[in-house]
Each structure stands twice: as structure tokens, then as C-alpha cells.
Amino acid sequence: MSPCQDTDTHAAPAGLAAARTGTTATVRVSGELDLDTAARIAPLLVRSLRGADRALTLDLSDLQFCDSSGVNLFLRLDRLSRAEGKQLRLQHIPAQPARVLRLLGVQHQLACDFLAA
């Protein structure tokens, strides 16, 4: 899947690439996840979750920036996944998004696998 298009030249928009292994769908989120990009990729992530048999894994290894809008998107996806009897997992979380998740305390609500500090 190609990255979302963005007219703002100073920010790398969030991009998505999807794969499926068994009952788990994996989506790699890259670039920057802010108010604008979170709103644009939310429908695609919901569609990926609904297409997964049991779980959706978000691979954040290429996510360079995440603000509270991105965290809110993760929380909404988690609520939706639980309502559908599925699991959401954030994996390979790099330093900046990890810092935001920890500051907001959501690492206790979400299944998070952080990269080594």
C-alpha cells in the first residue's frame, strides 16, 4: 500500500503497508502520525482490523513521530478490537512514540512491545 498523500512539505505523512499471516493482519505504520494523518488512515486501519480473523498487529518500527491524536487512534482501535473479540498489538515501538505512550500511561491499556531504549 502506498503512503497517504500530503501537501505539507515539512512532515512525512503516515504510510501503511499491510500483510497477513494466519489469523493475524499486520500493518506497518510509517512516517508521522498526527491529527491530520490519524484521521486519514483511521478508516484503513479499521478495515484491516475488520478483515483480521483474530488480531491486528501494528508494526511501528518506521513511525518517526506520534502525538496524542495517534495515541487516541490506537485506543479507539483497541476498543473496537475488543468489541469484536479480537486483539490489537503495537510492536517495535521506537523511542519518540514510546515516550508519548508512556507519558500518557496507555502502555498499561494497550499491548505494547517497545524497541530497546
Image (cartoon, rainbow, N blue to C red):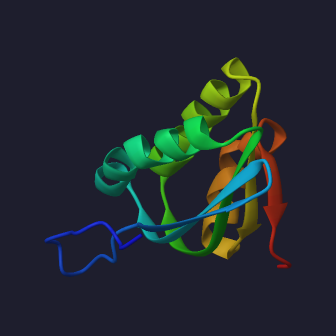
Q: Quarter of the image for the N terminus: give it.
A: bottom left
Total marks in image:
0
Residue drawn at x 66%, y 43% as measured from the top left:
52
Farthest-out residue, front: 22
Q: Nearer the viewer, residue 9 or 25?
A: 25
Query: In the rendered view, would you say 12 is above or below 33?
Result: below
Query: In the rendered view, would you say 8 is above or below 22?
Result: below
Residue drawn at x 56%, y 32% as measured from the top left:
76
Query: In the rendered view, would you say 75 is above or below 4?
Result: above
Residue drawn at x 42%, y 69% as measured from the top left:
32
Q: Quarter of the image for the C terminus: give it.
A: bottom right
Q: Position of residue 106 (x, y in %)?
A: 72, 41
**Is 4 on the left or on the right of 113, as rendered?**
left
Q: Position of residue 90 (x, y in %)?
A: 72, 55
Q: Quadrant of residue 54?
A: top right
Q: Position of residue 88 (x, y in %)?
A: 73, 43
**Is 111 on the left or on the right of 44, as rendered?**
right
Query: In the rendered view, would you say 75 is above or below 40?
Result: above
Q: Nearer the viewer, residue 38 or 44?
A: 44
Q: Position of residue 64 (x, y in %)?
A: 52, 76
Residue drawn at x 30%, y 66% as measured from the top left:
4
Farthest-out residue, top: 83
